[in-house]
Image (cartoon, rainbow, N blue to C red):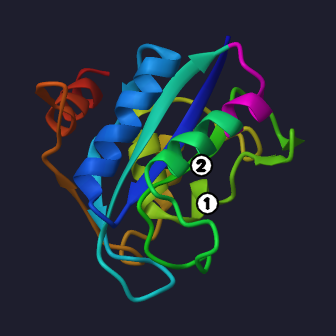
Amino acid sequence: MACIYLSLGSNIERYRHITAALDALADTFGELTISSVYESEAVGFEGDSFYNLVVGIETSESVGQVSKVLKAIEDANGRNRTAARFSSRSLDIDILTVDHLTGRVDGIALPRDEVLKNAFVLLPLAEIAAGTLHPVTGLSYAEHWQAFDKAKQKLWPVSFLWRGRDITAAAHELSRAT
């Protein structure tokens, strides 16, 4: 079983699309490790704020098969594949890391370079995988977050109910306990 971390984001009907994505991921992969949900300003374009979070899954599926499943979830949630790269989106799910794999695997670059570039990826990843080492730098995600220029990008946790619980509050409790 591989441990895979995914980044989820939406700035169109955010609650609906993030909830649908979490439901689909849980139905497909089983138990999820879920970070807090963070709201952040759009990066690279003018647009509505995003909801972002990181989800950990465990699967024996190949990276290529997982990618197909994620694209199907995005498509089921109205993802416009012809839109500009930096634009509003109903749902974006990216594979961030797969265990300690590096390089191109089934056409996917691992680890995803956004892990170390964007606060809305790095903070939630550091929250649920603080001691996990980045497969290229050898530093933990917590160490990367400590060194990150936090003035560069603004984000803030938001309450988010999924399946009867506030996953942001639950993630904060988990990170305090570890």
Q: Check if mark 1's residue and mark 2's residue have beta carbons within 8 Å.
A: yes
The Cα atoms of the two marked residues, 1 and 2, are separated by 10 Å
- Tell me if residue 130 can be seen: no
Q: Position of residue 12 (x, y in %)?
A: 32, 66
Q: Position of residue 11 (x, y in %)?
A: 34, 66
- Local packing at callout 1 (Cα closer than 10 Å; few below 14, some 14-19, many 20+) is some
- Local packing at callout 2 (Cα closer than 10 Å; few below 14, some 14-19, many 20+) is some
Q: Which residue is mark 1?
A: 114
Quadrant where the image shows the N terminus:
top right
Image point (37%, 34%), residue name: 22
Image point (13%, 27%), residue name: 165
* Rendered image quadrant of residue 2: top right
Image point (72%, 46%), residue name: 111
Question: Is label 2 in a helix, a strand or a loop?
Answer: strand
* Rendered image quadrant of residue 67: top right
Q: Which mark is residue 94?
A: 2
Q: Position of residue 29 (x, y in %)?
A: 52, 18
Image point (86%, 38%), residue name: 105
What's the magenta region?
Answer: 60-67
Q: Report the side of 134 relative to 105 (left or right).
A: left
Q: Report the side of 72 relative to 78 (left or right).
A: right
Q: Is residue 107 above or below residue 30?
A: below
**Amino acid identity at mark 2:** Asp
Q: Which mark is residue 135?
A: none
Is 157 a magenta residue?
Answer: no
Q: Is residue 50 above or below residue 136?
A: below
**Amino acid identity at mark 1:** Glu
Q: Judge by depth and name the residue closer to the eye, 64 or 105.
A: 64
Q: Position of residue 168 (x, y in %)?
A: 20, 39
Q: Is residue 149 above or below residue 95?
A: below
